[in-house]
Amino acid sequence: MNTYKGDTNICLPCPRNSHTTDVAQSLEGCVCDDGYTGNPGGPCDDIDECLANDGRGKCQDECMNTDGGYLCLCTTAGAKVDPHNRHACICQY
């Protein structure tokens, strides 16, 4: 999928960071991927998930925005990201 019907009855790819959920009849059938925002048909811009909560986003400690997502980091010496809860930090000792 991820194509739409162009003016000359050919399939064209959706813009970067967007997709279709079915056979799209026009460019407006392309919607932004998760982690991106924009009008149907694009362009789709990255959402900075780290802006909320004083720059921590959903993270307990530090948040690093990535293209289409984010990573939680632990800045306290001896702490690491909890493998069972990627938003929290745990002591690794």
Image (cartoon, grey):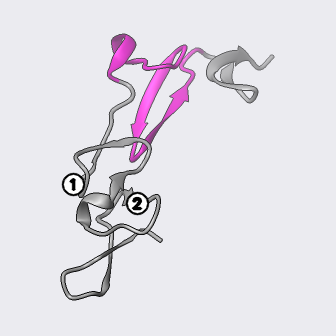
* Above or below, comparing residue 16 to residue 80 in the picture: below
The x, y position of residue 2, in whole percent, is 42, 68
Within the image, what quadrant is residue 65 found in? top left
Residue contact between numbered discs 2 and 1, judged by CB atoms under 8 Å: no
Q: Which residues are magenta?
A: 51-76
* Above or below, comparing residue 59 to residue 35 in the picture: above
Question: In the visual, does 91 lie left or right of 58?
Answer: right
**92 in magenta:** no
Disc 1 crowd rating (10 Å Cα; few below 14, some 14-19, many 20+) is: some
Judge by depth and name the residue closer to the eye, 8 or 74. 8
Mark in the foreground, 2 or 1: 2
Q: Residue at x 39, y 11 (%)?
A: 53
Measured in 3D between alpha carbons, the distance from the residue under mark 2 to the one under mark 1, in whole angstroms, is: 12 Å
The x, y position of residue 32, in whole percent, is 35, 50
The x, y position of residue 48, in whole percent, is 33, 33
Question: In the visual, does 7 lie left or right of 86?
Answer: left
> What amino acid is found at the position of numbered circle 1 in the picture?
Pro
Residue that carries the numbered disc 2 in the rendered image: 19
Question: In the visual, does 43 lie left or right of 77?
Answer: left
Judge by depth and name the residue closer to the eye, 54 or 6. 6
Dot 1: element: loop
* Above or below, comparing residue 32 to residue 70 in the picture: below
Mark nearer the N terminus (2 vs 1): 2
Residue that carries the numbered disc 1 in the rendered image: 43
Which quadrant would the C terminus be assigned to in this image? top right
Dot 2: element: strand
Disc 2 crowd rating (10 Å Cα; few below 14, some 14-19, many 20+) is: many
Q: Residue furthest left?
A: 7
Q: Residue at x 26, y 68 (%)?
A: 26
Q: Residue at x 58, y 14 (%)?
A: 76
> What amino acid is found at the position of numbered circle 2 in the picture?
His
